[in-house]
Image (spheres, coloured by chain):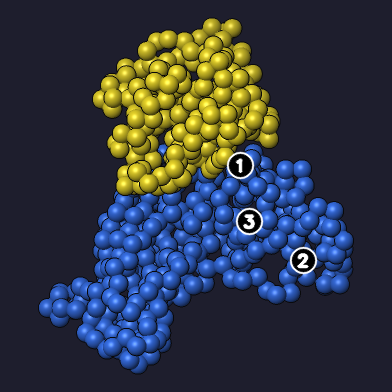
């Protein structure tokens, strides 16, 4: 890695260690922190390039049974298709560190998405956990919704059934769809934040 | 990190947990001859009863006993930042209704940036069963439990499912205090287990397990203890007057999203109690009205507390001075 890319990472790591109380970065109602990430399709994605559109961030770990519930029931793929067909940008984010559950190389993630018929415009590979920490992502599948002005309008669980049971998908209230529907029709988002249930995000071991 | 120092007395390398581990190990030894249990991911579970029979008009304690491999845990009723508590669907004979599950005091389970609340090693979750007064005497009735449990390590989670059952007769006389538990597999006298002394007399083991589990339940806080909670700059300050200086305290919230689970809990000992500063959750949608949860002061002292939040401005008028009082000073 070049020195020029190492310094910003070092700066972030130091900032994270020094000031854990300042970490609640992605607060609902505040500007969504910008990031640049590499997608499994090889593209470089910068969040701020999507200003003017709704953006959904989905924290992903293909070994997590809470994520499995959403993908094996086809619910996550349904949501991705439903909302991207209406102009919403959807990023699946993999913040698992190498060697940990949910970590995938670009090829592995592309195979997984093809097998699951998942259709996010991009799956961002975040093995260093930079994007995850920037948004204080605690679990998979934690979900964040950002409005066209770049403001976080939802941060939390995917729905109101914090279980791993596939049978709980049909009756659940989906907070992501609710936030998008309400915001698109000019209404305030009724439930802007919830406890993001699921598996812990498998970050690289803390060095501090 | 500060939190690690604060929580050191919960560290498995120290006294309390060591005692628990030894206790669990001894129970495991005692149980091994008798109980194979139903497999769940990285552990086993069984359905046990404290009493030998269902007594009409009385309450019967049933228990879901989990035994987990080292490094694996299950969750408390409030799982914390991740996870899911075990859930049971009961299949009960008519006239028997299940009460709420009684949750022993959990542990803080810390991993990377999150804190969960749950149980390691072994735990017995007690469910009281209420038998109607008019229940007619009958031969052994089957009590079934379909249990869903999420078993996790710091690295991964595996959902498990188990169908358990137990057969107990219904009698009109009250349950004997040292009643013997009849396990479904011991009903058949030809069962080779019946020749095993442990299997012939499993009641002693069951009773010990229930007694230990009841001891691990948080108790209601004594009536003369005074608590107040003030909302101050993103923190909740729990002030407690127990009539003695308290050096250690840790709080487990019963409701999700009241406090930041992973934030350090700062204890400030004062003359007649302590002040505990908890970081308020970023995810509170409405102002918090009550702080409800389990307060742990030592390995053997945990209490259920339910404290209304002081109204802004009124916080210092009555309760705060009492906290500073030296009235209880030894």
* Residue B206 seen in this snapshot: no
The single residue placed furthest to the front in the displayed view is: A185
Q: Report in which chain the residue with disc 2 lies.
A: B
Q: Report in which chain the residue with disc 3 lies.
A: B
Q: Are marks 1 and 2 in contact (CB under 8 Å)?
A: no
Do circles 1 and 3 both sit on a common chain?
yes
- Give left or right: position of B61 versus A27: left
Q: Which residue is mark 3?
A: B251
Q: Report in which chain the residue with disc 1 lies.
A: B
Do circles 1 and 2 both sit on a common chain?
yes
What x and y, as percent, mark residue A43? 43, 10
Label 2's element?
Answer: strand
The chain painted yellow is: A
Q: Earlier in the sequence, mark 1 or mark 3?
A: 3
Q: Nearer the viewer, mark 1 or mark 2?
A: 1
- Give left or right: position of A53 versus B244: left
Q: Which residue is mark 1?
A: B283
**Chain B colour as displayed:** blue
Pick whichever, B258 or A176, lies toward us: A176
Q: Residues under labels 2 and 3: Cα distance?
A: 15 Å
Q: Which residue is mark 2?
A: B241
Image point 49% across, 36% down: which residue? A178
Categorize mark 3 by other alpha carbons within 10 Å: few (<14), some (14-19), many (20+).
many
Q: Residues under labels 1 and 2: Cα distance?
A: 29 Å
Image point 25% across, 25% down: which residue? A115
Residue B166 vertical position relative to residue B189 in the rendered view, above or below: above
Q: Earlier in the sequence, mark 2 or mark 3?
A: 2
Pick whichever, A147 or B113, lies toward us: A147
Label 1's element?
Answer: loop
Q: Quadrant of residue B314?
A: bottom right
Q: Residues under labels 1 and 3: Cα distance?
A: 18 Å
Image point 57% across, 54% down: which residue? B255
């Amino acid at each position: 890695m070049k020195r020029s890319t190492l310094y910003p990472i070092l700066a972030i790591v130091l900032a994270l260690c020094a000031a854990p109380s300042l970490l609640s970065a992605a607060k609902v109602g505040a500007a969504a922190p910008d990031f640049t990430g590499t997608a499994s399709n090889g593209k470089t994605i910068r969040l701020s390039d999507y200003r003017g559109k709704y953006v959904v961030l989905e924290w992903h770990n293909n070994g997590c049974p809470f994520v499995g519930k959403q993908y094996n029931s086809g619910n996550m793929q349904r949501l991705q298709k439903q909302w991207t067909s209406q102009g919403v940008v959807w990023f699946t984010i993999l913040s698992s560190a190498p060697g940990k559950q949910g970590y995938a190389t670009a090829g592995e993630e592309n195979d997984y998405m093809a097998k699951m018929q998942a259709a996010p415009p991009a799956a961002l590979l975040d093995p260093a956990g930079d994007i995850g920490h920037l948004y204080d992502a605690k679990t998979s599948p934690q979900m964040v919704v950002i409005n066209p002005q770049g403001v976080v309008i939802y941060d939390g669980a995917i729905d109101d059934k914090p279980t791993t049971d596939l049978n709980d998908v049909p009756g659940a209230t989906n907070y992501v769809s609710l936030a998008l529907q309400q915001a698109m029709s000019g209404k305030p988002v009724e439930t802007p934040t919830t406890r993001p249930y699921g598996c812990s995000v498998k970050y690289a071991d803390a060095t501090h | 990190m500060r939190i690690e120092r604060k929580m050191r007395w919960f560290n498995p390398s120290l006294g309390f947990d060591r005692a628990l581990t030894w206790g669990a190990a001894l129970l495991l030894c005692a149980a091994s001859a008798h109980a194979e249990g139903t497999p769940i991911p990285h552990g086993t579970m069984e359905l046990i009863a404290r009493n030998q029979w269902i007594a009409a008009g009385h309450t019967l304690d049933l228990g879901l006993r989990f035994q987990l491999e080292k490094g694996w845990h299950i969750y408390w009723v409030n799982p914390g930042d991740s996870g899911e508590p075990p859930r049971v669907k009961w299949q009960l004979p008519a006239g028997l209704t299940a009460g709420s599950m009684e949750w022993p005091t959990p542990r803080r389970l810390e991993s990377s940036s999150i804190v969960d609340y749950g149980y390691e090693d072994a735990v017995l979750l007690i469910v009281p069963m209420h038998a109607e007064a008019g229940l007619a005497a009958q031969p052994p009735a089957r009590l079934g439990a379909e249990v869903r449990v999420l078993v996790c390590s710091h690295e991964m989670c595996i959902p498990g499912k188990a169908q358990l059952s137990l057969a107990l007769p219904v009698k009109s006389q009250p349950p004997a205090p040292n009643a013997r538990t009849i396990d479904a597999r011991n009903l058949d006298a030809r069962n080779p287990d019946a020749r095993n002394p442990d299997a012939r007399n499993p009641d002693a083991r069951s009773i010990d397990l229930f007694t230990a589990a009841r001891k691990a339940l948080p108790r209601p806080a004594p009536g003369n203890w005074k608590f107040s909670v003030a909302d101050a700059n993103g923190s909740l300050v729990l002030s407690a007057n127990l009539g003695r200086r308290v050096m250690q305290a840790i709080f487990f919230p019963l409701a999700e999203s009241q406090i930041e689970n992973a934030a350090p809990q700062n204890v400030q000992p004062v003359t007649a109690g302590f002040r505990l500063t908890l970081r308020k959750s970023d995810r509170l949608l409405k102002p918090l009205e009550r702080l409800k949860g389990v307060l742990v002061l030592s390995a053997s002292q945990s209490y259920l507390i339910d404290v209304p939040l002081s109204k802004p401005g009124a916080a210092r008028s009555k309760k705060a001075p009492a906290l500073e009082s030296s009235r209880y000073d030894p």
